Image: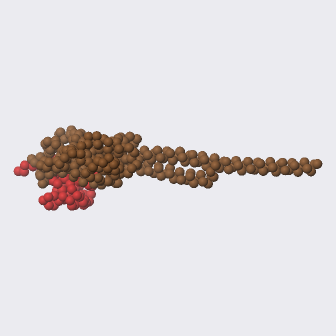
Chain colours: A red, B brown
């Protein structure tokens, strides 16, 4: 069994029954995305990675490149310089430097 | 007395001036509300970051993102945010006086932002480590070079123009490390019930220390950006004040010119009227003289 904490709260789903999560991508002075999403992909020091609903609590530094968001409202690509991602209980927050 | 056509030109010029000052006044007021909104937005970002930071960090020493191992180069860095142009009154002089009160060149380094302040320091023979231009835009200000410089010091003091109200702007000094902790304390209540973030509850990549360093770096960047924005806010407020005064003066001058124009027109009418009356009297007296001559 993993030592990392499992998510206690019930799974979030969209109208079609697809799992979703809350996603916020923003910097101190600008908000890039703040809505429900199916997945978010970025690059950290180990390489590209994806976050899906029900992911373990996770905190990582994001390298410069693209953040790709797949969401019910439409897909989005955000070019970033440096960032920090925090995943906790189906809520993903990406802090960007610009 | 000047002719009405000449005065009309002055009236037109002054009316343009009134419109211009009114536009500048509105622009300054618009910028003020935009900057206020930006600062509010950055407060939310800061609060959420601090929330995470205080759940990870065990000791409260703020290292400006340089990590536990690296030692600071010097005791204190003074960051002075001044205006870029020369139309800032005496506020920059007051700011520099405040910064130099306890200045010791062996212990302190100075980074100056804004051309006006750099000139004043040079005139006083004070060396500064770096000079940056005050960013013209209010969005996307890149303070990364200053944040990188701040990493090398135990203490970072910022001196800036602070906005109190549209009519009052002061100079302030701020210990950035202490200000960050104070700001964070405000959001501590909501953290009390939240769980601790550590390697037991979270996966960290690449590791906890590097994450802490990045958060400290982000927070330093935010606070420096906020200080620059507040300085700009104070400068816009000061410009707003100047524009309001100029608008009032232009309005008064326009009223004076209009009165002068009307007086000049009336004076010409009066002169013509006088000429007509004199002319009529002359004609009348000539007629009477003719009549008298005929009767004789």
Answer left or right for B249 relative to B164.
right
Instruction: Identify the residue at the far right of this view.
Output: B296
User: Residue A50 lies in what quarter of the image?
Assistant: bottom left
* Above or below, B174 relative to A57: above
Residue depicted at 44% across the width and 46% down the height: B242
Answer left or right for B237 relative to B258.
left
Instruction: Identify the residue at the far left of this view.
Output: A1
Instruction: Identify the residue at the far front of this view.
Output: B125
Indicate the position of residue A21 as horizontal and vertical percent values: 20, 53
Indicate the position of residue B236 as horizontal and vertical percent values: 38, 47
Residue depicted at 34% across the width and 42% down the height: B94
Answer left or right for B252 relative to B142.
right
* Nearer to us in this view, A65 or A71: A65
The image quadrant where one finds the C terminus of chain A is bottom left
Residue depicted at 82% across the width and 51% down the height: B283
Indicate the position of residue B111 as horizontal and vertical percent values: 27, 49
Residue depicted at 68% across the width and 50% down the height: B268
- Visible in this render: residue B223? no
* Nearer to us in this view, B60 or B288: B288
* Nearer to us in this view, B49 or B12: B12
| Number of marks present in the image shown | 0
- Visible in this render: residue B124? yes
């Amino acid at each position: 069994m993993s030592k990392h904490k499992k998510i206690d709260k019930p799974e979030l789903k969209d109208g079609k029954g697809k799992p979703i999560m809350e996603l916020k991508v923003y910097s101190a002075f600008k908000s890039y995305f703040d809505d429900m999403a199916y997945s978010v992909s970025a690059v950290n020091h180990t390489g590209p990675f994806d976050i899906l609903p029900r992911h373990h609590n996770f905190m990582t530094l994001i390298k410069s490149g693209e953040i790709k968001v797949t969401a019910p409202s439409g897909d989005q690509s955000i070019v970033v310089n440096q960032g920090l991602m925090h995943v906790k209980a189906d809520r993903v927050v990406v802090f960007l430097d610009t | 007395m000047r002719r009405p056509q000449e005065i009309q030109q002055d009236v037109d010029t002054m009316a343009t001036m009134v419109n211009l000052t009114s536009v500048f006044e509105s622009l300054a007021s618009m910028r003020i509300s935009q900057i206020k909104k930006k600062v509010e937005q950055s407060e939310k970002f800061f609060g959420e970051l601090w929330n995470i930071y205080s759940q990870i960090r065990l000791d409260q020493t703020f290292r400006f993102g340089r990590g536990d191992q690296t030692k600071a180069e010097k005791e204190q860095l003074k960051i002075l945010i001044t205006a870029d142009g020369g139309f800032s009154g005496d506020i920059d002089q007051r700011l520099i006086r405040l910064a130099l009160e306890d200045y010791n060149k062996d212990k302190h380094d100075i980074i100056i932002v804004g051309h006006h302040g750099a000139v004043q320091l040079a005139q006083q023979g004070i060396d500064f480590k770096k000079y940056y231009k005050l960013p013209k835009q209010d969005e996307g200000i890149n303070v990364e070079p200053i944040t990188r410089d701040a990493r090398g010091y135990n203490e970072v003091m910022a001196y800036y123009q602070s906005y109190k109200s549209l009519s009052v702007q002061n100079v302030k000094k701020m210990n950035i490390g202490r200000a960050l902790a104070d700001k964070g304390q405000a959001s501590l209540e909501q953290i009390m019930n939240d769980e601790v973030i550590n390697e037991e509850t979270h996966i960290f990549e690449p590791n906890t220390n590097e994450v802490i360093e990045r958060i400290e770096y982000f927070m330093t960047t935010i606070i420096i950006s906020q200080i620059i924005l507040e300085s700009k806010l104070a400068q816009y407020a000061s410009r707003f004040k100047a524009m309001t005064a100029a608008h009032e003066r232009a309005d008064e001058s326009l009223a004076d010119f209009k009165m002068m124009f009307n007086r000049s027109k009336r004076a010409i009418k009066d002169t013509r009227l006088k000429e007509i009356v004199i002319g009529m009297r002359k004609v009348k007296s000539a007629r009477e003289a003719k009549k008298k001559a005929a009767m004789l």
